[in-house]
Amino acid sequence: MWKVDLNELRQNSSKNSFSKMEDAAKKKYNDFIKCIQKGKSPREAAQTIGSSHGSNLERLGNNLMSIRLSQEHRVTFYIRESTSTVVINSVGTHYKNA
């Protein structure tokens, strides 16, 4: 079962711009987290919140992944396959802090 680790995000507030995001982007982020907590893989969760064109899931390198929440905002995360954990790196930024 997949789980979410928010510790990295909590330890570095400069990577957390959730409060500055528009409501639609906040909803997508919350839906992504809830999908994972319900056992979906990161790819499945991304597809669930994605547009009609796909999941918006992108590999950024060094095992860092990104999902578009809006034109401006992204959530970036690492995947720990060994523990089925999604480690949230940043939210509400546009790669500047990733």
Image (tube, rainbow, N blue to C red):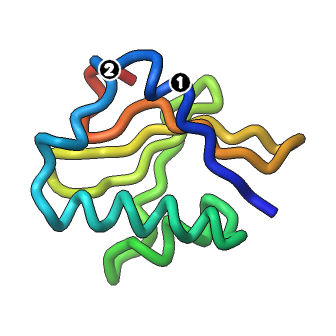
The image quadrant that residue 61 belongs to is top right
Q: Position of residue 98 (x, y in %)?
A: 39, 24
Q: Amino acid at mark 2?
A: Ser
Q: Is residue 31 left or right of residue 6?
A: left
Q: Nearer the viewer, residue 85 or 10?
A: 10
Q: Amino acid at mark 1?
A: Glu
Q: Nearer the viewer, residue 55 or 22?
A: 22
| Residue under the point 53% across and 41% down | 65
Residue for badge 2 = 13
Tag count: 2
The image quadrant that residue 39 belongs to is bottom right
Residue for badge 1 = 8
Marks 2 and 1, the one that precedes in the sequence: 1
| Residue under the point 82% across and 44% down | 81
Q: Is residue 59 left or right of residue 70?
A: right
Furthest toward the right, the residue is 82
18 lies above or below 61 = below
Q: Is residue 12 left or right of residue 8?
A: left
Q: Secondary structure at mark 1?
A: helix
Q: Is residue 68 left or right of residue 54?
A: left
Quadrant, the N terminus: bottom right
